[in-house]
Amino acid sequence: MTIQSQSPLPTLHIDLVVDTICPWCYIGRRRLQKAVAQRPGLDIRVRTRSFLLNPNMPDEGVDQVTYMSRRFGNEQRIGRILDAIEDVGRAEEIPFNFERVEKVPNSLNSHRLIRLSADLGRQEQIVDALYEAHFVDGRDIGDPWTLIDIAAENGYDSEMVQGYLEGLNGVEQVLTDNAWAHRQGINGVPTYLFEGGPALSGAHEPQVLLRLIDVAKELAGQTLLRDD
């Protein structure tokens, strides 16, 4: 999501706090991408930070129908919720396909893969791939072998990723990120944290995010002037 230019541009950092099993996080991420694209005069650097909506989820995940029934009750209500998400998704060019999603996975391993991709400087690509794999293709992003395949499809060395996921690499960092988010008072995702500026929770429209980008840019400029 970083905009490249041959000449130096003002830099703005945004932390985007998400969980990979949250459809609204997918929508919120897409809307932020649209907002960033409308500010080509800024070098906007987005960092994905981990939030675990279900920290006690079994390693193998939970059946989608069972999970949704526990959270939202009867089938009619679940249908309305999923239909509404699909409608919003279509407007953002996200073809949600909940019929393919058989389970809600434990998201820890997917966050570990995001952590690895950040260390390699390729976070944006893998985050998009994880959301598409889960919500469009119905793949189990809690399964390490599925994650290895997704990584390989995006140019990663399979053996390297396998070695990373077989150990405890990245676990502490993900849990630390999750704890940090709670200390910031974040109890829902997506949440946007603009450098030196406001925080915002919810998958807001690009126009709202643009206003906050502009506010953060102005505040950053004032800070630079004071430092001078």
Image (cartoon, rainbow, N blue to C red):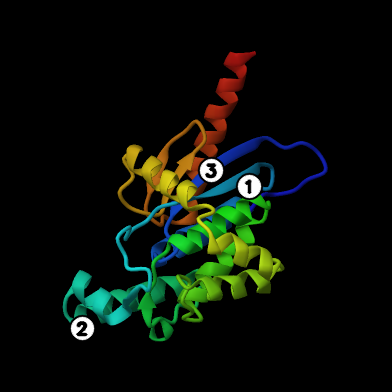
Give percent across and percent down for residue 24. Answer: 40, 63
Label 3: which secondary element: strand
Q: Tell me how far mark 1 sits from mark 2, CA to CA.
A: 42 Å
Q: Could you tell me the amino acid type at mark 1?
A: Arg
The picture places residue 53, in percent across and down from the top left corner, at 33, 58
- Say if residue 106 shows up in the picture: yes
The first of marks 3 and 1 along the sequence is 3
**Residues tagged 3 and 2 counted as in contact (Cβ below 8 A):** no
Calculate the distance from the C-alpha at mark 3 to the C-alpha at mark 1. Answer: 14 Å
Decide which of 28, 121 is in the foreground and name it.
121
Q: Amino acid at mark 3?
A: Ile
Identify the residue under disc 3.
14
Mark carried by residue 135: none
Badge 1: residue crowd in 10 Å (few <14, some 14–19, many ≥20): some
The residue located at (52%, 28%) in the rendering is: 219
Give the farthest residue toward the right.
6
